[in-house]
Image: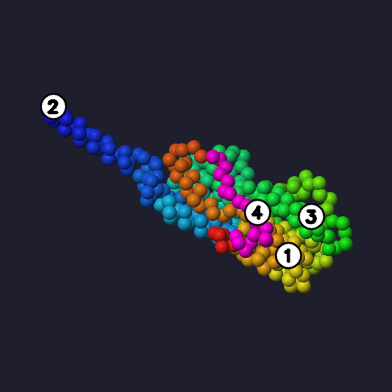
């Protein structure tokens, strides 16, 4: 009898051990495929499109990180349309993915679909840009960059540079005339960068030295940036001293417009933009741009790590920032080889 009981106990212990290894454990396995409830984690990811070098790098980072993390990625490109993002999120919910991540093209209009995700018990991570919601519990974490600080850093650098280089206004007034190429209308990054720039200018003892002559969206694209800069130059060719572009792609388009107007970008017009893509480093090496404020698109690894923690029931920070710096032209040549995007 004792022998039979001992054997029964041994068999029971073996069954329990097997169950813990692959059964109820939501934890992602340390190596290989990340698992949730024993199956491979599936993430629905809604990307806004491919409007800039930065966006392409952001997409590549997410796809590579998912592969390395053993997470199955259902990737959707919204072609710059919010309604396509909402459709994609609904499709992810219908598919029963384990987690949803998305880059909100604009700040508002997400409450209903994120409530549907919450009702379906699918956690949501906001990536890159911010959302404005009545109920912030509709997403678990935000991964991205600080657009307000990026805008502040732009003005700080401009004011230091114009002073250090002893620059004088071109148009014969006592103020530097600034034109701004804004990002996507309604996006948190365009709003944050513009607010940061204006707040830092207003707080500066040199505020009276600067005037924003014109400010218009270039939609974060090179083509539109060139078109809008052409219109700025048509009206104020000999007055403009400074271009602030909300991203490098629009600055690169504007450089073409400035050259076509017979002016020297980086000299007649001081140019600063945000992102830190390789193209702007090349322009700075050629003396056609003066500074870029980094906005780091390589958010994939942090996104996958955060997703695993959430599905593992671990607590995560509501806001996870990725690091970023400021790169003036005089460091461009030595920095370019190190740039990853
Ligand atoms: O600056 C721009 C891209 O959301 C931070 O979107 C991102 C911005 C970036 O199109 O190049």
Please give the residue where the numbered disc 4 appears in the rendered image: 326
Asked which secondary structure carries label 4, the reply is strand
Q: Residues within 10 Å of mark 1 (few under 14, many from 20)?
A: many
- For the residue pair 282 and 181, the one nearer the viewer reads as 282
Please give the residue where the numbered disc 2 appears in the rendered image: 2
Dot 1 or dot 3: first in sequence order is: 3
- For the residue pair 163 and 139, the one nearer the viewer reads as 163
Image quarter for ligand 1: bottom right
In which quadrant is the N terminus drawn?
A: top left
Tell me if label 2 and label 3 are in contact, CB under 8 Å.
no
Q: Going by the image, does 16 lie left or right of 155?
A: left
Q: Which of marks 1 and 2 is in front?
A: 1
Please give the residue where the numbered disc 1 appears in the rendered image: 266
Please give the residue where the numbered disc 3 appears in the rendered image: 163
Dot 2 or dot 4: first in sequence order is: 2
- For the residue pair 127 and 205, the one nearer the viewer reads as 205
């Amino acid at each position: 009898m004792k022998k039979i009981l001992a054997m029964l106990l041994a068999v029971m212990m073996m069954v329990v051990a097997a169950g813990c290894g692959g059964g109820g454990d939501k934890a992602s396995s340390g190596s290989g495929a990340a698992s949730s409830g024993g199956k491979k984690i599936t993430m629905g990811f809604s990307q806004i499109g491919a409007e800039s070098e930065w966006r392409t790098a952001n997409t590549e980072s997410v796809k590579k990180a998912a592969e390395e993390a053993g997470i199955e990625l259902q990737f959707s490109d919204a072609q710059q349309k919010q309604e396509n993002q909402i459709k994609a999120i609904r499709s992810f919910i219908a598919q029963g993915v384990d987690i949803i991540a998305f880059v909100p093209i604009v700040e508002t209009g997400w409450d209903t679909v994120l409530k549907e995700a919450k009702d379906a018990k699918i956690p949501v991570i906001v990536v890159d840009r911010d959302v404005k919601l009545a109920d912030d519990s509709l997403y678990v974490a935000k991964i991205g960059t600080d657009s307000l600080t990026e805008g502040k850093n732009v003005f700080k650098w401009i004011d230091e540079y114009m002073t250090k280089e002893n620059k004088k206004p071109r148009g014969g007034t006592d103020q530097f005339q600034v034109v701004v190429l804004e990002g996507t209308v309604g996006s948190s990054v365009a709003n944050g960068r513009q607010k940061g720039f204006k707040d830092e200018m207003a707080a500066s003892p040199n505020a009276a030295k600067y005037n924003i002559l014109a400010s218009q969206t270039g939609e974060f694209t090179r083509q539109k940036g060139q078109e809008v800069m052409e219109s700025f130059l048509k009206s104020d060719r000999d007055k403009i001293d400074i271009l602030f572009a909300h991203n490098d792609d629009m600055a690169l388009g504007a450089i073409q417009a400035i050259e076509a107007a017979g002016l020297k970008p980086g000299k007649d017009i001081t140019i600063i933009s945000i992102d830190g893509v390789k193209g702007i480093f090349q322009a700075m090496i050629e003396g056609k741009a003066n500074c870029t404020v980094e906005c780091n698109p390589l958010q994939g690894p942090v996104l996958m790590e955060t997703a695993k923690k959430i599905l593992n029931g671990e607590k995560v920070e509501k806001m996870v920032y990725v690091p970023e710096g400021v790169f003036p032209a005089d460091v461009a040549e030595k920095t370019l080889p190190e740039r990853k995007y």
